[in-house]
Image (cartoon, rainbow, N blue to C red):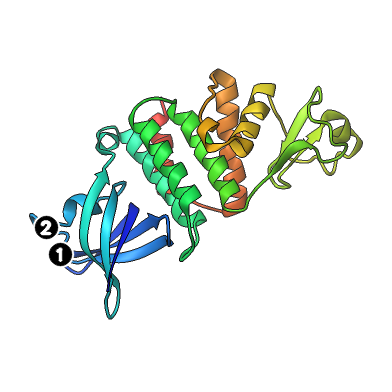
Amino acid sequence: MLEKLNGLVLKQRNIGENDRMLVLLTKEKGVLEVCARGVKRMRSPLAAGCMPLCYSEFCLFEGKKYITVDAATPIRNFYQLRLDPEKLALGEYFCDLASVLTPESESAWPMLRLLLNTLALLEDDRRQPLLLKAIFEFRSAAIAGFMPDLVGCAGCGVFEGEQMYFLPQDSCLLCGNCKAAHPQQGQGGVLLRPAVLKAMRQILYADEEKLFSFSLKGESLKQLDWVTERYLLIHTGLQSRALSVYRALQAP
C-alpha cells in the first residue's frame, strides 16, 4: 500500500552497492527510517529528493524488510547551504538534534516546522548563524520535554533581580539574593546578562511567528550560544560531529 508523506532528510547511510537508508523527519510519523533502493545509480529518479537536508514529498510502501521509497519529489532542497561549509555543518547539526530529540511514530509538526524555518533563515542570511543555533538548541530542547523554568527565581519567584543566575543542571533561575543565601543550591549557576535572559525567555515562550524576531550582538550573543549549547549537552549528552566541524570552521 502506497502512502504519501512530506519529510526532511536528516541522515543517510549506504547499504549495499546502490541503496541508502534515509532518516526522515515527518509531520505525521516523527522520525522514520526508509530505504531508497537504487538511489546511488547514475540518473536515479530518486536522487534529487533523497539528498540530506532536502524537504520532499515521499511516496512510500511497506516492504518485507523496510519501508521503501517509491518516489521522491523535492519541495525545497536548501541548495545554497551546500555551498557554504559553515552553514552546511550547522544545518547538519540541526538535523542531528532533530533525530535525537524527536520520537518515532508520533506527530512531530512543532519540530519539523522549527527545523524548516531555521534552515530557511540560515540559507537566506536573514539571521546570524550563531543566533539561529542558540534558538534551535533551546527551542528544540523545550519541544522535546527539556523545558527549563525561566518565569522567575526558583527561590523567591522574582521575575527580574539585580542579578539572575541560570542553573543548567537544575533547569531554573536563581536571583543573586537566593544564590547567596543557598550557595550549595546555586553551584554551577551562570550570571546572565539581562539581554540574554530576555532572549532565552523569548525562545521558550514566544509564539512561532515571533520566535525569530529579535537580535543579539557581541558578548550577549556569545553567552547565549554558550548557555544553550551547555544546557542541551547536559540534558541530552549529544556528541555531534557536525557541531565539531562547525566549531573548527569558526576558529580564526
Residue 36 vs residue 240, the one in the foreground: 36
Q: Residue furthest top?
A: 218
Where's the C terminus, which quadrant?
Answer: top left
Where's the N terminus, which quadrant?
Answer: bottom left
Numbered disc 2: secondary structure: loop
User: Mark on residue 38?
Assistant: 1
User: Mark on residue 22?
Assistant: none
Residue at point 62%, 49% (across, down): 234
Contact between labelled residues 2 and 1, with CB atoms less than 8 Å apart? yes
Q: Is residue 38 left or right of residue 56?
A: left
**Above or below: residue 210 compared with residue 147:** above
Q: Is residue 57 left or right of residue 39?
A: right
Residue 111 vs residue 217, the one in the foreground: 111
For marks 1 and 2, give the CA distance: 7 Å
**Above or below: residue 42 compared with residue 16:** above
Residue at point 75%, 33% (across, down): 165
What percent of the width, then of the height, locates residue 80? Answer: 26, 33
Residue 231 appears in view = yes
**Above or below: residue 86 compared with residue 26:** above
Of pointers 1 and 2, the one earlier in the residue sequence: 1
**Residue topped by disc 2:** 44
Residue 251 vs residue 64, the one in the foreground: 64
